[in-house]
Structure formats: C-alpha cells, structure tokens
Image (cartoon, rainbow, N blue to C red):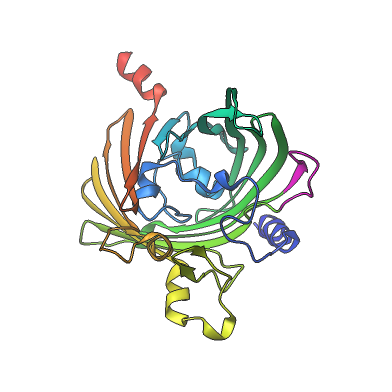
Amino acid sequence: MKKGILIFILFASAARVLPQTGGDNVYEFLNLTHSGLVTSLGGTNVSLTNNSINLAYHNPALLSSEMNKSVALNYVNYFAGINYGLAMYSRSFPGKGNFAAGLTYLNYGTFTEADPSGNITGDFTASEYALSLIYSRELDSMFTIGINLKPVLSHLEEYTSFGFAIDAGASWHNVSNNTSAGILIRNAGYQITTYAGEPRQKLPFEILAGISHRLAYAPFRFSLTLRHLQKYDISHEYSETGITEQKDEESINFLDNMFRHILPGAELIPHKNFYFSAGYNFQRRQELHTSSGSSAAGLTWGFGIKTTWLDIELGSAIYHLAGASTNVSLILRPDMIYRKQR
C-alpha cells in the first residue's frame, strides 16, 4: 500500500501544474463526457462507485472487479452534425488487478473545401481518436489506485497530430457508511507531432477531486466534484462581441469563481434497478446563458435502468437556448447472458 501511494504522489508532483482551462489547449475532446450517468450529474465525476465501467474513463481508480467482462457502448449526438462515442471492455484477474481497453472518437462531420478564391474544390473531414488502456489495483479493502494511458490521433483535413495523455487517480470507499471519494490528475501528457510544424501545444491538464454519499435511510445519493484545482481563477468577462481578456485578480467575484469549480449532483434510487439523476454546471451556465431571456443552461438530468445483463443510461445536458446534447450508454455483461442460456 505504501508503495502504491508513493508512486501516485511522485506522479502528481511530476505533472506540470499549469493554469489551463478549456479552449487553450490541443486535444480538448479528451474532456468530453460519454457516460449518460456522469452527464446527468453535471458532466464530471471521480468518486462514484458502482458497477458501471464508464466510470473508469473518468477515474481509472474506479475500475473494479465488479466490472469484470463488461462492455460499454456510448453514443452522443452533439451539435451541428458532430457526434462522438466510446466503446470499452474490462477484465479482472485475481492477484493481478483490473484491466480495461477502450476507444473514443469525435467526428466533426464533412466540410466543403474551397480554394482562396472561393471556388468549391470538394469536401474534407475532421476527426480525433484516443485509445484508453486502463489499469487499477486495490491496495486494501478501501483504497484503489489506477492509471489510464491514452495515445491520441487527431486528423483535421490533411493535417495530423499524434500525442499521448495520462490519467492517474485514487479512490477511497467505505461500504459501512456508503461514502466514497476520489482524486484524479487528468491529461498530463505531450503532443509528439504537430499539425503543420507549429510550436507544440499544451494538453487540457486538470486536477479533480470529489466525494459521493448515499443516505442510509432514504433513496438518495449525493455527489460533489471539484474541478480545475490547479488554477484558482477560471472566470472570464463576456461582452456582446465575444470574450474579452481574463479578469484581473482584484476584480474577481469570489463566490462566482468558487462555484465555477463545483459540480453538484444527486440521484434518486427508489429501486436497485432504476435511478433518476440531476446535476448543475455553474460554469456552463455563466458562459452560455443569454441576457435576452431565461434559459436552463447548466442543468443536467437523466435516468437509468439496470438488469442482470444490461444497463441503459440516458443523460441530457442543456448548454444553451439553442439546444441540449443527449448521451446514450449501454453497459452489457455478455458473461451473464451466457450463464442464463446455460
């Protein structure tokens, strides 16, 4: 156990803790949420423990033996013809740990190609891919550590970039009081080759922590996730013409900035085979709501149905008055189907 904790601390100290937020980095698609459950809880969760293999993508330490031989299939119909998804499979080996492999993709769709004079010359496509190689190991009955190695390929028209990212996480869970917690260092990595000889760019590095608790005598579970712990100020000023420079530290509204770091989520679990969930993303609300009228930007919700061999998760995130995205997740356990047939 001491060796595992030491490795995690060394990895954390070696990571470059840079002041980064969305839009400033390469491979931003690595931060997209695939799981219907996680989408419904605000978009990010590093502490929740159940048998959904999708959770391992958000924190590799959440990969457990309960997910053995599980298959996850995720699809998201995003905006403007963009879609993305994730497929993942896991295996557990007693005494060796838990392993999972998955592939995530982002398809930007087809674009019209034109020369500098505006003459149409054809079409082109753009897409990005990342392989997930996840390993987790239980240090004892309460602590688990995990790592996710993510080779990345980004292909935009005729330009291609290669890189890699690493997630390292730890999870703590106490079965007796229905409480779990997690911490994650996400997207520490390097852009190996650039698109067209430009300087290498930073990856969307982030440090997260969270806690989840299920009430003992009521069908509720609550989660609280803290994002961008490596950077204090993640707020921006906005004008009708677009984003202006980032606020000076003296002008920061303390409460506004604090709530941008927090993602609250709640689940109603009236039966072990069904849940309804909801969350709130304050940063998304502040950045995408309109002054001309009220909107539900920042709100997330979803529900799930669980059976012996199949789980169905649906999550919806409201981004803007213009619409919302819907995440559909299927978690299959083929081994259980085979057992029923026997």
Name above or below for residue 251 compared with residue 293: below
- Quadrant where the C terminus sits is top left
At x 47%, y 74%, the residue is: 257
- Residue 199, position as x, y percentages in the image: 79, 50
- Residue 83, position as x, y percentages in the image: 45, 34
Q: Nearer the viewer, residue 167 or 197?
A: 197
Name above or below for residue 224 compared with residue 102: below
User: For this view, does 58 lie left or right of residue 289?
Assistant: right
Q: Nearer the viewer, residue 311 or 118?
A: 118
**Viewer can see residue 62:** no
Magenta part of the protein: which range?
Answer: 190-201
- Residue 168, position as x, y percentages in the image: 63, 52
Main secondary-structure element of the magenta-colored stretch: loop
At x 24%, y 40%, the residue is: 273
Name above or below for residue 248 compared with residue 159: below
| Residue located farthest toward the top when viewing the structure as drawn | 342
At x 52%, y 43%, the residue is: 57
Residue 216: name its quadrant.
bottom left
| Residue located farthest toward the front when viewing the structure as drawn | 117
Q: Nearer the viewer, residue 307 or 293?
A: 293
- Quadrant where the N terminus sits is bottom right
User: For this view, does 334 lie left or right of residue 110?
Assistant: left
